[in-house]
Image (cartoon, rainbow, N blue to C red):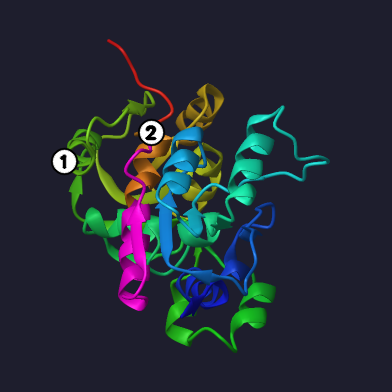
């Protein structure tokens, strides 16, 4: 018999909640830690499609990347989408857990895997953990793991590439990426920073860390301008595209730890938008 609290413990080992960004809402957001579980589903976002799939397949816990609720709510009613989803899940005893930015920044998390795909050398966190966080978790996290925890990743390209070569690599990694780039004069890339999801706000941090190019999921118009003014290349390839695949990895990692459970990534989840040419 596996209890939800055992799954929570393993998730915190994979992606320690202590390293999540201060503004984030992570951990068990809905559910009873003492409840027995048999089926677990991972997904990027709670939508009607993922809620319906979880209920139809008798899922006991959804491990979702984006937290719901993200901000405090004063009431839970079916008059809002957040309230409706939570009401449906609670009514069917489906727990909800979100690691969010803890998974982004974990040793084997999303940003690390992006950097490894490009075969970068000397990969390290773009922004190291604050000393108070290191002190708080040093007793439960190995010294080797601590070295690999922090916001984003930055690494060195083996042989300096052009931005066009980097974009070609993204096309090889992702099906139908949504590519946008700034009007940078950058001709050769030696160091790349990665921030999954909405990472445009990290342009200044990437530049300070020594990156020539920041690759992220999405950025605003003014963040593209800021990167250009900093002399930093900026490439985005879609918020969903930068994170969705990691939920398959997380389900595989959990499956290895709990072979007696049925664990899978949502089959019905889709990107929130598409582009037309």
**Extreme residue toward the top, this view:** 277
Q: Is residue 151 visible?
A: no
Task: Say which of 221 and 210 sits in front.
Answer: 221
Q: Identify the residue position indicated by label 2 in the image.
A: 238
Neighbor class of circle 2 (other Cα within 10 Å; few <14, some 14-19, many 20+) is: many
Q: Identify the residue position indicated by label 1 in the image.
A: 172
The residues colored magenta run: 246-270
Task: Say which of 185 and 103 sits in front.
Answer: 103
Q: Is residue 83 visible?
A: yes
The percent coordinates of residue 130 (x first, y second) are: 63, 69
**Is residue 140 placed above or below 22 in the rendered structure?**
below
| Residue 210: mark | none
**Could you say whether the residue bearing mark 2 is in a helix, strand or loop?**
loop
**Extreme residue toward the right, this view:** 74
The percent coordinates of residue 40 (x first, y second) are: 43, 60
User: For the residues marked 2 and 1, what is the alpha-carbon distance in whole angstroms?
Assistant: 14 Å
**Could you say whether the residue bearing mark 1 is in a helix, strand or loop?**
helix
The percent coordinates of residue 42 (x first, y second) are: 42, 54
Q: Earlier in the sequence, mark 2 or mark 1?
A: 1
């Amino acid at each position: 018999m596996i209890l939800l609290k055992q799954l929570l413990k393993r998730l915190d080992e994979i992606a320690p909640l202590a390293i999540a960004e201060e503004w984030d809402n992570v951990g068990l957001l809905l559910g009873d830690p003492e409840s027995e579980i048999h089926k677990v589903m991972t997904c990027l976002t709670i939508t009607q499609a993922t809620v319906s799939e979880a209920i139809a397949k008798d899922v006991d816990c959804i491990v979702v990347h984006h937290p719901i609720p993200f901000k405090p709510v004063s009431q839970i009613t079916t008059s809002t989408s957040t309230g409706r989803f939570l009401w449906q899940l609670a009514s069917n005893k489906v727990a909800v857990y979100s690691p969010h930015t803890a998974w982004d920044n974990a040793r084997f998390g999303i940003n690390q895997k992006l950097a490894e795909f490009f075969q970068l050398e000397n990969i390290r966190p773009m922004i190291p953990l604050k000393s108070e966080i290191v002190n708080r978790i040093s007793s439960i996290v190995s010294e080797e793991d601590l070295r690999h925890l922090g916001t984003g990743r930055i690494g060195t390209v083996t042989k300096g590439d052009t931005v066009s070569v980097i974009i070609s690599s993204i096309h090889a990694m992702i099906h139908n990426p949504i590519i946008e780039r700034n009007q940078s004069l950058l001709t050769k890339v030696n160091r790349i920073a990665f921030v999954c999801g909405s990472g445009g706000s990290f342009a200044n941090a990437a530049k300070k860390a020594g990156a020539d190019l920041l690759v992220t999921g999405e950025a605003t118009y003014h963040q593209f301008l800021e990167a250009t003014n900093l002399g930093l290349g900026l490439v985005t390839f879609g918020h969903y595209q930068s994170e969705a695949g990691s939920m398959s990895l997380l389900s595989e990692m959990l499956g290895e730890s709990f072979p007696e459970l049925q664990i899978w990534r949502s089959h019905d989840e889709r990107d929130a938008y598409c582009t037309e040419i």
